[in-house]
Image (tube, helix red, strand yellow):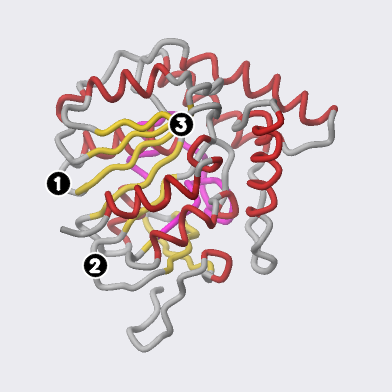
Amino acid sequence: MSTTSDDPIITSYAEAPTRTVIADGTTYAYRELGPKGSIPVVFFVHLAATLDNWDPRIIDPIAKTRHVIAFDNKGVGASTGKVPATIEEAADDAYTFITALGFDKIDVFAFSMGAMIAQDLTLEHPGLVRKLVLTGTGPRGGKDMDKVAGVTYWDMLRATVTRSDPKEFLFFNRDAVGKRAGKEFVRRLEERTTDRDKDIKISAFRSQLAAIKAFGRSTPSDLSKITQPTLIANGDHDRMVPSVLSEDLHRRIAGSELIIYPNSGHGGIFQYHEQFAPIAAEFLAES
């Protein structure tokens, strides 16, 4: 499944080949890049996202020095199976995928729903995770997190009317700066021209939304159990997962670092990729 040590090192996400691994009857699709032989950085993707939804301006700088792995959640994109009904089940699937690749220690870079999954994974398997980057997210049971479905459907409607990508509305402010950042972000996602992933199915998308809603309405997890070094980041005007939830997460995870970018939304780390990517790469640098 993996390349040999004699293969050239790929450091461009747009050029990373799509691979598969079979675990517990599910075929998981993933892409890997960067130098191998170290603890990998596993990227956990957002609601409705496939392998094609990672910003290369975030992944590529990290892959210069680290082994990076991005994967399709079960039942999404080129991964087979049924989308899990809960975030906890998604974390179990992620553990199955990671261990199928033979890893017993990873670093995590997670965004939005992916960072909810990463929280559950870390709580369930604390020995697996060394460092955490949690962006555009919040804790289980966080205030108003269960309203994400309403915001998502409304912005999808607005995007349809204006013939835009929904992420331009969901991830970015609708001022001149945000509109420009949104269009630039969408263009970057299109830099990969071959071996593109399959879009998520509507039924799978709805299942993910329901899982997030349940996560938002669940009893809060004891995040004091997360003792790993943790970096939290968001924009100051996140409409999908309210920015105050990043501050809540920061308070609950002792010793965590928090970055809030001004005049930006859910996709603040993508709008400020030039500033955030080096910070994340330094944070994830192996000690």
Q: CA distance from mark 3 to mark 1?
A: 31 Å
Vertical order, 168 against 214 (above or below): below
x, y percent for residue 141: 36, 15
Q: CA distance from mark 2 to mark 3?
A: 31 Å
The tally of labels here is 3
**Residue corresponding to mark 1:** 127
Q: Assess disc 1: are there few (<14), some (14-19) or many (≥20) residues with their C-alpha within 10 Å of its C-alpha.
A: few
Q: Residue at x 25, y 38 (%)?
A: 230
Instruction: Say whether disc 3 or disc 1 marks the residue closer to the N-terminus.
Output: 1
* Quadrant housing the C terminus: bottom left
Residue type highlighted by circle 2: Ser
Looking at the picture, tell me which residue is in the foreground, 78 or 186: 186
Q: Which mark is residue 38?
A: 2
Residue type highlighted by circle 3: Tyr
Magenta run includes residue 88:
yes
Question: What is the magenta range?
Answer: 69-94
x, y percent for residue 142: 38, 15
Image depth: mark 3 or mark 1 in front: 3
Residue type highlighted by circle 1: Gly
x, y percent for residue 180: 70, 39
Residue 166 position by quadrant? top right
